[in-house]
Image: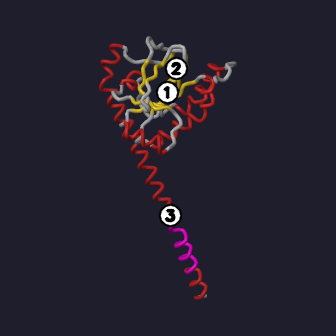
Amino acid sequence: MKKLKLKVKAGLLKSWWLALPLLVLSSWWGYKNYHQFEQCQAINQKLMNELKKASGQVRAQKRFLEEGDRLSTPLPLSLLDGQLVKIEPDETYLLIFISTGCPACLEIALDVYGKVHRYEEKGLRIISISRNLVEELVDMTSARNWPMAVAHDTTGQLHRLFQIDGLPSVVFIEHGVIKLKANTLSIDRRLPELKEMILAAFVGQPSRP
């Protein structure tokens, strides 16, 4: 009986030592994910505070664009590679607002891109937009082999114009009209709607050379 108890204890001790690395790895992974969540939360909170601070003037002068609004003039964008492009009223665009300090945001942005990028060959322009430093954006695009064009919103003008209140956010513009805006809280819910809108915008259109 005594030998049996010793064997049981030895077995339990062996199982504990085998499970210990898994417990340590699980704890580290949980801490890492929580830390990334805190980073994203802090970035979104900072953005919301900035928008709230300027909301009085912005709303009074109607300097922002909502769903259904139309761009009155072409909207210039400065790309990270030095090119200057304009959002023209006769083109269709998907703008994805991101931050390099939020890994989860970047993953969501890549997921959205992966679901609609096939429409680029039909004319959809997909552009990611960030307020991060140029150096940070260069590092991020290189490390992640970023598939989208990146526009650097130096002054935050585009974020204010579209009232971006959480990251990531997407804005779908069809022929100058803001057809859909979704932030981090509504992207998942509205992604099917976005895909339907993009499909309808290019139905029957041949691929561009």
On-image quarter of the N terminus: bottom right
Q: Which mark is residue 95?
A: 1
Identify the residue at image location x=34%, y=18%: 58
Give the Cα distance between marks 2 and 3. 48 Å
Mark 2, other Cα within 10 Å: few <14 / some 14–19 / many ≥20: many
For this orientation, the residue located farthest to the bottom is 2
Give the Cα distance between marks 1 and 2. 8 Å
Q: Secondary structure at mark 3?
A: helix
Residue 26 on image: x %, y %: 50, 59
Identify the residue at image location x=37%, y=36%: 134
What is the three-letter code of the residue carrying label 1?
A: Leu
Near-viewer residue (142 or 107): 142
Residue 70 on image: x %, y %: 48, 13
Decide: is 70 above or below 54.
Answer: above
Q: Are the residues tagged 1 and 2 within 8 Å (C-beta)?
A: yes
Mark 3, other Cα within 10 Å: few <14 / some 14–19 / many ≥20: few
For this orientation, the residue located farthest to the right is 204
Could you tell which of marks 3 and 1 lies nearer the N-terminus?
A: 3
Give, as a single range, the part of the protein colored magenta: 10-24
Near-viewer residue (201 or 90): 90
Could you tell me how many numbered marks the image carries?
A: 3
Residue 25 on image: x %, y %: 49, 61
Identify the residue at image location x=43%, y=29%: 79
Q: Nearer the viewer, mark 3 or mark 1?
A: 1
Q: What is the chief secondary structure element of the magenta stretch?
A: helix
Identify the residue at image location x=43%, y=18%: 75
Residue assigned mark 3: 23
Residue 96 on image: x %, y %: 49, 30
Give the Cα distance between marks 3 and 1. 41 Å
Residue assigned mark 2: 173
Could you tell which of marks 1 and 2 lies nearer the N-terminus?
A: 1
